[in-house]
Amino acid sequence: MLTGQIRNQIDQIWNAFHSGGVSNPLSVIEQLTFLIFIKRLDDLQLTMETRAETLGEPITNPIFPAGTDEEGEPYSNLRWSRFKNFESREMMRVVDEHVFPFLRSLGEKGSSYGQHMKDARLGFSSASLLAKAVAMLDRLDMDNRDTKGDVYEYMLGKLASAGTNGQFRTPRHIIQLMVALRRPTPTDTICDPAAGTCGFLMEAGEYLRHHEPQMLRNAEQRDHFLNHMFHGFDFDATMLRIGSMNMLLHGLDNAEVSYRDSLSERYGKDEGLYSLILANPPFKGSLDETTVAKNLLQFSKTKKTELLFLTLFLRLLKVGGRAAVIVPEGVLFGSSTAHKKIRKTLVESHKLEGIIKLPSGVFRPYAGVSCGIILFTKTGVGGTDNVWFYDLQADGFSLDDKRTPLLDSEQLGPTPTHPLDDAEHEKNNLPDILTRWNALTAEANRPRTAQSFLVPKEDIAAKDYDLSMSRYKMVEQEEINYPPPTELLTELNELDASITAGMAALKEMLG
């Protein structure tokens, strides 16, 4: 949990960049990512030095070697702990002319630390801004893994513009809900083929640390968790750097966060590899058919990215693999052949488990599009019995562009610190979703006028596999008894007579 002091420090850093001419939130995050990464490298070297001194052994594979770089600058000057004390112009010279080329060389050598830094550049020319940013970041207490992650998440929360390809940041509480619904296990192999800032992967890691702490004491499970569990792909280099840093600061240094245009490349070796997919893919609209992987088009001839991603998810999942993915509402009721085919496939060939309808304001200020969460398991042989529908009406925040919290922080999210009463539930439905999801057998008794209910597969098939909640939810009609027409006419006549008498009295009084 971030303190008010740390939040204020981050806001001051942000304002310093803005006043220094770096006003694009994505550019600010990118530059802060570079600086945090540079500081992280020095922290790692300090850890190596401490361990070596304790054991009385030399450092193997140091990040900063002895000697000088090709330009004659001592490598020791490239370390955060050294240049942070330099005068601002000297600091700018060292960072711009030596530290960033060093970062790029790490990437070229294939270092796990620098794989996303191949084209890293200092994005501003103000020495005073650099000195101010370095001083402010140095004062941030980021020794604790949770604090480091929360600091970065708070920075990411300041991103307020959608990406050029239709991607936008998924609110953290919605990610937490989806992760909790799918309940990751220590043996899962988790993938987000449209990773962005890696929010889904990061939250899955945090969920496991909290709910499965024993896995970190098991050598095999610990190795899997740290080195093999998490896989994120994106084709935006900036997002890859940000996502990689997000994972690193949450203690997942070796997560696979790599460049891939998921819809344009054959998935080949990744087919059937993952046991859990968590994603909110970009909804760009239509792609050029020539750029789409042929093995995706074999299933359905469509250019719609949202349908192609669903097809991709089914291909990437192993049998028994689960998924929680966000789709635009049109996927749930679209009438095209491709729309119907993917819905029928989910219902008849796999196990479709749930549809959660999201209010249109959930993704503001990025977009006002109406979306839903689809929960399914890949089986290849069917298995759908009843599909659970939930009408999410409130997520704890106002549904306008400001997204103002409606409750105290401990009452927000899917797992508040105490059960919510009816008034609090009206402002935050997320805990109720988890409660009902974990007791689905009881949902069979709920009428279709309720906020959630089960719909048999046969009913869905009868409606041509339409998955929009409105097709199944019944509106409860309240019976109103009106008096007979003769009584109404009598009342009207009496009222008319009263008005006439009143007008006559007024006329007489006026003369």
Image (tube, rainbow, N blue to C red):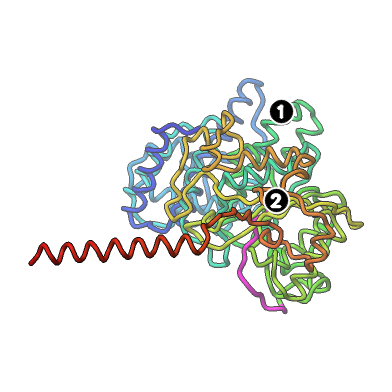
Residue 261 locus on image (x, y percent): 68, 65
Question: Quick check: 266 above or below 251?
Answer: below
Which residue is located at x 79 percent, y 33 percent? 221
Question: Quick check: 313 above or below 230?
Answer: below
The label shown at residue 213 is 1
The answer to whether residue 232 shows anywhere in this view is no
Measure the C-alpha gap from mark 1 to mark 2.
21 Å
Residue closest to the eye, 272 or 489: 489
Residue 385 locus on image (x, y percent): 85, 52
What secondary structure predominates along the stretch shown in magenta?
loop
Question: Quick check: 307 above or below 322?
Answer: below
Q: Quadrant of the C terminus?
A: bottom left
Q: Describe the element under mark 1 as helix, strand or loop.
A: helix
Q: What's drawn in magenta, residue-wise? A: 279-290
Which residue is located at x 72 percent, y 74 percent? 335
Residue 371 locus on image (x, y percent): 61, 59
Q: Is residue 52 left or right of residue 465?
A: left
Residue on which the image places disc 2: 278
Q: Quadrant of residue 182?
A: top right
Q: Nearer the viewer, mark 1 or mark 2?
A: 2
Within 10 Å of disc 1 (Cα), the crowding (few <14, some 14-19, many 20+) is: few
